[in-house]
Amino acid sequence: MAALARFCFRHRFVVLLLWVCALLGTAVAAQAAGSRWANDFELPGTESAEAVDLLRASFPQTSGDTDSVVWRAPEGDSVRDPQIRARMTEALAGIAGVPQVGRVVGPYAAEGGGQISEDGRIAYAQVTFTEQAMNLEKENVEEVVDTAQAAAGDVDGLQVELGGEAIQAVQGAPGGLAEVTGIVAAAVILSIAFGSLFAMLLPIVCAVFGIGTGLMTVTLLSHTTDFAEATTLLGSLIGLGVSIDYALFIVTRHRTGLHRGMPVEDSAVRALDTAGRAVLFAGGTVCVALLGMIALGISFLNGVAIAASLTVLLGVAASVTLLPALLGILQTRVLSRRQRRSLAEHGPEHAPEPGDPAAGEAAGRAARWALLVQRRPRLLASLAVVVIAIVSLPLLSLRLGTTDQGNHQESKTTRKAYDLLADGFGPGFNGPLQLVAETPGKADTPALSRLITRVSRTEGVAEVGTPAPAPGGRITVVQVVPDSAPQDEATDQLIDRLRDDVIPAAQEGTSLDVHVGGVTAINKDFASVITGKLPLFVGIIVALGFVLLLVAFRSLVVPLTAAVMNLLAAAAAFGALVAIFQWGWGSDLFGLGREVPITAFLPVIMLAMLFGLSMDYQVFLVSRMHEEWVHHGDNARAVRVGLAESSRVINAAALIMICVFSAFVLSGDLEGVMAGIGLAGAVALDAFVIRTMLVPALMHLIGPANWWLPTWLDRHLPHLAVEPRDTPGGPEAEPRREELAKTAGGPE
């Protein structure tokens, strides 16, 4: 690290130029190539996926994306009025002539007779494209939108809206305001913390370069790899947090070196060789945790894992290459004018005794808190556990699902179309189920007819459509409309009822084979698969964290404690999400509308993020404790000093991340809002309750056993140097560590 830091410091303008070229080059290339997002939730081996495969093989003419044009007549009028009918017929004819539009079925044709609501005020047309949404030209979809909405201007009071995947895609990816707000909030906190404009700008600039290059690269990769549209939002969410935090740790260490009178280059190199090593360790851990999603075997999450890891990786790269170059450009201007003047007049500061309450106002507060934790460990540990338990309690009601266009902002045409269809045709119309039946035998057709009759009488079914046989007659599709909304638990129960009871009874004694498909069934299967694989993923990341901390700190108790703390932070995060979104507590405050289940893929993504962030805090906290333990062999002193000297930077970093994550409430995307609120709450609890209260209190109660490691295991573990060799906690301290391990056996 020292050699890399010195090279970047001395060749600072070359390094800066390379980063500028990388950012501008990827931005220009991404702008020219555009993006091709793939919002595909299908899972091979599930019943809904089998239904999709049969439909694609049997109905190739309707294999493209199907969207809706929905209109409502003015109060007191009907969509059958001649003026409205003539204008919408003309508009639908215009849409049919748009390139990549394969078929338009309107309510005024014979085959669209059921597409007008009972009160006659709402009607819809189905627009089937020749390609899936990800393969459509944006200009063609925009022409469909413009043609449809132009009809509303010709008839007073006529409302025309559009819904569907293709329409959603041209509305644009959400998030820009959230990222800007998060950066502004971080800038304010950094200004207060550093008191220097240039010092404040350093973490922001590194984050912009790292995240910008990462997101532009992901946009380019979307042409070769399936990335969901939410990937950029999630990538910027985690990228902003870790990039700013990593640069903050390094800049803080560099400023401390300058205050102590070190030459600028030596201080920068020293900062990178100490804090930079921890940044590499923490960033690598985050990437490995994110890439752990690939082990789940879900293609949708593979893209998210790759994109988020790439963003974090480039954020780390900016921190360890671009940052020392910028430190070389700014020289001592990372200190405020007052600090530079004080340094010139009074000379360098002397390092205070670790944990000394008199070492400055802020340091004094941290030291007094560390002393309080040492004196009252049982009380504070109990208080922390109670807080975590209360926040985590709603987790027992967790229900996974997916969001849909009914969760879009009320101003978007997709949300308006969704609400119009629900008003005119019932809440389940936006998420119909499809019975895809294979009828290879002669007796199967009567059996299918009996099944349709039984389904129509099943609890939770509002309407059953007319069977639609495919050419050849061996595949038949029947549409089933639930009487509940797609996200309601009652709809999930209906799918289970059909699959477990109604359909098996009809298939008995025949060769009839019926699959329940449709978007709602796909979403339910996706949530079920995630739920089933979640324990595996939790086990993977917990085991990974345990091994990494075991190797880094040569202790069994420290990694075990960290694993439990990570799980507590995750439980609290999801407990808060359940209360806000699933129970609806405070959802109106965020403008989120009705209660919704927790998006199925968020637990995996958030667990990976929280694991990485928690590891960051654990490493920065325990590494200082470990250094003090190896140097003095006094557990009480080690915990007190480590907490006193680490808590300030941990709290500042956490406050920045809380602001960054909270800003995603403004993203306009429900997944972004969920992730932002969940991560902000988890970071607050992790930093202010778990790492600075519960962990040190437990370490005081456990005593020297915190640092115990069996001799036989110590001999077989590889040596991972988080600190450079010339620091008290470095590899040369192994003899002292082995000596202390023999006596670390019980509580203080």
Image: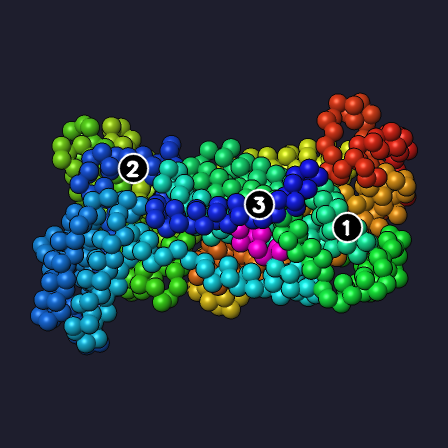
Q: Is mark 3 on a helix, strand or loop?
A: helix
Nearest the eye: 323 or 78: 323
Mark closer to the observer (2, 1)? 1
Sequence-wise, which precedes: disc 1 or disc 3? 3
In the displayed structure image, the side of residue 552 where residue 407 appears, left or right? left
Q: What residue type is labelled 3?
A: Val
Sequence-wise, which precedes: disc 3 or disc 2? 3
Residue 15's mark? 3
Nearest the eye: 486 or 155: 155
Position of the N terminus, as image quadrant, is top right
Q: Could you tell me what secondary structure mostly forms the magenta stretch?
A: helix
* Residue under pointer 2: 51
* Residue under pointer 1: 263
Q: What residue type is labelled 1?
A: Pro
Residue 437's mark? none
In the displayed structure image, the side of residue 282 where residue 532 appears, left or right? left
Q: Give the range drawn in magenta.
A: 202-209
- Distance from Cα at disc 3 to Cα at disc 2: 54 Å
Nearest the eye: 455 or 436: 436
Q: What element carries label 2?
A: helix
Query: In which quarter of the view is residue 256 placed?
Result: bottom right
- Distance from Cα at disc 1 to Cα at disc 3: 21 Å
In the displayed structure image, the side of residue 316 where residue 128 appears, left or right? left
Whether residue 399 can be seen here: no
Q: Answer yes or no: do the residues labelled 2 and 1 have beta carbons within 8 Å?
A: no
What's the residue at 88%, 47% (across, down)?
636
Q: What residue type is labelled 2?
A: Ala
* Label 2 packing within 10 angstroms: few (<14), some (14-19), many (20+): many
Q: In this view, does 80 lie above or below 433?
A: below
Q: What element carries label 1?
A: loop
- Distance from Cα at disc 2 to Cα at disc 1: 69 Å
Mark closer to the observer (3, 2)? 3
